[in-house]
Image (cartoon, helix red, strand yellow):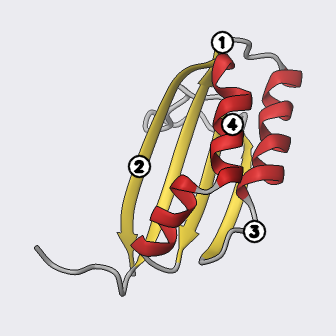
Amino acid sequence: MTDNNDKQLAHIVFFDLNDDSDAARQQLVEAGRKYLSGHDGTVYFSVGIIGQGFDRPVNDHDFSVALHVVFENKTAHDIYQTHERHLTFIEENKANWKRVRVFDSYVA
């Protein structure tokens, strides 16, 4: 197995919500900003609601909120996964999650 710790890692998460109201979407975005931004080893962070008006056949509309975090490497990602703020985010918000899909990939 190749050691990929010298590569940046993109951590993309798509949340489908039980309560899919605008208020619930915004609440999750705000919680994401509060708990998931500013972690050591973060190169890029963004969180937001699904974009309206993207209607090409390839557009996936099966989510409410998307989180995008790029880490310096897998070690930074692994530390984030067990960080108290990340765990608090999960605990405070998971009750409204219908489905969560996580896509992790190394990026150039």
Q: Earlier in the sequence, mark 1 or mark 3?
A: 1
1 and 3 marks in contact (CB < 8 Å): no
Mark 2 lies on residue: 103
Which kind of residue does numbered mark 1 sit on?
Asn
Q: Is residue 92 left or right of residue 83?
A: right
Q: What distance separates the C-alpha of mark 3 from that of mark 4?
A: 22 Å
Mark 3 lies on residue: 38
Tell me which residue sits at (63%, 43%) in the image: 87
Q: Residue furthest top?
A: 18
- Residue 15, position as x, y percentages in the image: 59, 32
Tell me which residue sits at (28%, 79%) in the image: 4
Q: Residue furthest right?
A: 23
- Comparing marks 3 and 4, which lies closer to the viewer? 3
Which kind of residue does numbered mark 2 sit on?
Phe
Tell me which residue sits at (50%, 30%) in the image: 100
Q: Earlier in the sequence, mark 2 or mark 4?
A: 4
In the picture, the disc for residue 18 is 1
Mark 3 secondary-structure assignment: loop
Mark 4 lies on residue: 50
3 and 4 marks in contact (CB < 8 Å): no
